[in-house]
């Protein structure tokens, strides 16, 4: 099936009881600033073209960001940093992301997460991570013919990604590569092209407010991954 067909099924997923309850509770209670909006309150699918050469892997949708707007990193502070950086390196047509119909288009890049529902405190349990793996496994298999590079934002995404890459046919070294900002590994694939995987600190406020992660640092990793993908 196609990525669009997969996403149509994904948005109805209810496999994780705690996350279903949380995403729906947040959608009802809302944040005061968004009280006139209808929250999405469902699993948030990946965003970007189905023949992407580059994939960005985050953690999970933000309660009042992706869980409100229905699009990854859209309407939250992390997304402000990510999309500004994608625009700065020529991989997005605009620097901001506010809603699903804001005109944003990514050039050869798809953005996804190993957990598709907003978790309390941005912390999915290991069981929730493993339950949601079916979706990123399938997304990776569907993207495999065109995929050349991956940028992983943060250690959670890094830990979640390698088992999924192995499921999708790439040779994952043992021991697993260690996460860090600037980490870079190249994975062989028996059937197809090698894959360049890059680590980047997560674009959350926890890192950007403190200066641990600067826009220039994000742009540098995105530019490296874009070059590796031929974009
Ligand atoms: O419905 P569609 O225009 O084929 O787009 C599917 C999906 O991919 C949607 O989330 C927009 C996104 N997208 C993108 O981000 N960049 C593109 O160049 C084309 C589509
Ligand atoms: Fe389904 Fe993933 Fe959401 Fe769990 S986190 S309910 S597996 S979409």
Image (cartoon, grey):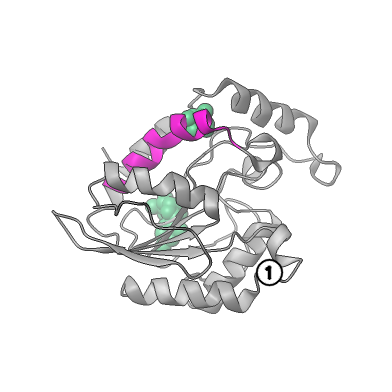
Residue 196 x/y as whole percent: 33, 66
Q: Residue furthest top?
A: 17
Q: Which residue is mark 1?
A: 212
Residue 44 x/y as whole percent: 53, 40
Q: Secondary structure at mark 1?
A: loop
Q: Is residue 80 at all visible to an observer of this figure? A: yes
Residue at position x 52%, y 39% in the image: 116
Decide whether residue 140 is among the magenta residues: yes
Does residue 27 appear left or right of residue 18 in this picture?
Answer: right
Residue 186 x/y as whole percent: 30, 65
Residue 159 x/y as whole percent: 46, 47
Decide whether residue 14 is among the magenta residues: no
Does residue 50 appear left or right of residue 183 in this picture?
Answer: left
Q: Is mark 1 within 8 Å of ligand 2?
A: no
User: Measured along the vertical axis of the image, is residue 163 above or below residue 11?
Assistant: below
Give the residues drawn in magenta, as a range.
124-141
Magenta stretch, main secondary structure class: helix
């Amino acid at each position: 099936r196609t990525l669009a067909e997969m996403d149509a099924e994904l948005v109805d997923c209810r496999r994780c009881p705690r996350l279903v309850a949380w995403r729906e509770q947040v959608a009802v209670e809302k944040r005061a600033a968004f009280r006139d909006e209808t929250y999405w309150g469902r699993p948030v699918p990946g965003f970007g073209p189905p023949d992407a050469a580059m994939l960005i892997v985050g953690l999970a949708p933000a309660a009042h960001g992706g869980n409100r707007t229905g699009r990854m990193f859209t309407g939250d502070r992390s997304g402000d940093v990510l999309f500004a950086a994608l625009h700065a390196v020529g991989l997005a047509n605009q620097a901001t992301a506010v809603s699903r119909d804001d005109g944003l288009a990514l050039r050869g890049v798809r953005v996804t997460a190993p957990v598709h529902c907003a978790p309390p405190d941005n912390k999915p349990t290991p069981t929730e991570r493993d339950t949601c793996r079916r979706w990123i496994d399938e997304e990776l298999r569907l993207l495999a013919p065109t995929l050349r590079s991956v940028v992983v934002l943060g250690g959670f995404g890094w830990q979640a990604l390698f088992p999924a890459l192995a499921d999708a046919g790439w040779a994952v070294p043992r021991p697993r590569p260690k996460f860090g900002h600037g980490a870079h590994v190249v994975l062989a694939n028996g059937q197809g092209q090698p894959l360049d995987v890059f680590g980047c600190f997560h674009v959350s406020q926890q890192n950007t407010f403190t200066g641990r992660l600067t826009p220039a640092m994000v742009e540098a990793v995105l530019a490296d991954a874009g070059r590796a993908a031929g974009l």
